[in-house]
Amino acid sequence: MFIYILRHGDASSEARYKDTERPLTDIGKLQATHVGKFLQQQKIHIETLLASPMKRAQQTASIVGQKLQTNSVTTTDFLLNGAGFISLIELLNQLHSRSVLLVGHIPHLVGALSFLLSDKNNREIELGKCSLAIVESLSPIEPGHATLRQLIHIDSISKHIRV
């Protein structure tokens, strides 16, 4: 299984929004569009698209999904900060997908990535806004048995897309 781990795009920091309702900024929408175009140009097919219930993750997933013609986004609390990594892995194993895109937040995504790669919650990986980690794992997924194939920051993605 290929697991694409994507941090949401740049979101509003205006105090008028509750954290769960913070929308993407125009920059965040552009970042998500670039990620979607990048995946499309790489001919990557995503079978399952999972996102945290927070607005900024939902919007990021929706924009990327539109570019990939995968309009169905499934919401899961397992991508929220504080959710257990074992629960997320159990969910991934139940999907029986060959490729899944996870859209969420740090520090949870960094912890989940580290757990997949090393069976530890190591927070030393930098995952900036709209950065994409590509992980490969045999099925069933087991903590510490995945391989990091690529870690791409939005600056690199933006340079490589054809508008």
Image: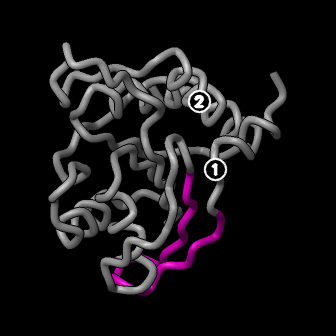
Q: Which residue is mark 2?
A: 31
Regarding residue 140, the answer to whether it shows in the image is no
Question: Could you classify mark 1 by the number of other residues whose Cα lies within 10 Å: few (under 14), some (14-19), or many (20 or more)?
Answer: some
Does the magenta run of residues contain 48? no
The percent position of residue 159, horizontal first and vertical second, equals 81, 38
For the magenta stretch, what is the residue range? Answer: 132-150
The quarter of the displayed image where residue 155 is located: top right
Residue for point 47% across, 54% down = 5
> Mark 1: which amino acid?
His
59 lies above or below 151? above
| Image color mode | one colour
The percent position of residue 73, horizontal first and vertical second, equals 34, 32
134 lies above or below 59? below
- How far apart, in angstroms, are the residues tagged by discs 2 and 1? 10 Å
The percent position of residue 139, horizontal first and vertical second, equals 41, 76
> Mark 2: which amino acid?
Gln
In this rendered view, identify the residue nearer to me: 95 or 27: 27
The quarter of the displayed image where residue 31 is located: top right
Say whether marks 2 and 1 touch (CB < 8 Å). no
Quadrant of the drawing holding the C terminus: top right
Specify the label residue 153 is tagged with.
1
79 lies above or below 134? above
In this rendered view, identify the residue nearer to me: 144 or 154: 154
Residue for point 32% across, 58% down = 107
Q: Between disc 2 and disc 1, whose residue precedes? A: 2
How many discs mark residues in the rendered view?
Answer: 2
Using residue 13 as the reference point, say whether residue 5 is left or right of it: right
